[in-house]
Amino acid sequence: MKIYTSYFAKAGTLAKKGIVPISIARWTPKWYEGERVLDAAPTPDMLKDDITREQYIERYNTILRRLDVKRFVEKLQAIGKGKNVALLCYEKPEDFCHRHLLAEHMNKLGYEVTEWEEKKPEQMSLF
């Protein structure tokens, strides 16, 4: 199983590609009916506008220190049933968000987690 990260706007595309979308956000869009795993979701107080990025990272690192990554991956495997999975939140790949912090943490522990990128078909050259 490969573990990707992505954002809700790509959920339909991911599913069509055979990748199981899994929300790791505290709340999901109203239209999202997919799987959710809250083990790595930010706490509600972290989502308020009155904390700095540094405070957010500090609080999220507390979540990561408590996260049993092996058990988390086992949950993902159970949900994915042999398929690749994508951990979703709201922000676009270039924006700061907790999924990047989670991926970095998991990578340090030996789990490969990468941002999903849609592969564009190569154009054939006539020359």
Image (cartoon, rainbow, N blue to C red):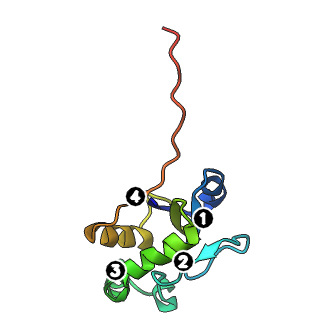
Which tag is nearer the camera, tag 2 or tag 3?
Answer: 2
Which SS class for mark 2?
A: loop
Q: Residue at the spot x=50%, y=72% of the render?
A: 76
> Mark 1 falls on what kind of element?
helix
In front: label 3 or label 1: 1
Label 3 neighbour load within 10 Å: few <14, some 14-19, many 20+ = some
Q: Residues within 10 Å of mark 1 (few under 14, many from 20)?
A: many
Q: Residue pushed farthest top? A: 127
Determine whether label 3 and label 1 are within 8 Å by CB.
Answer: no
Across the whole image, how many numbered discs are drawn on residues?
Answer: 4
Alpha carbons under labels 3 and 4: distance apart: 19 Å
Circle 3 SS class? helix
The quarter of the displayed image where residue 25 is located: bottom right
Residue under pointer 3 = 57
**Residue marked by disc 1:** 8
The answer to which of marks 4 and 1 sits earlier in the sequence is 1
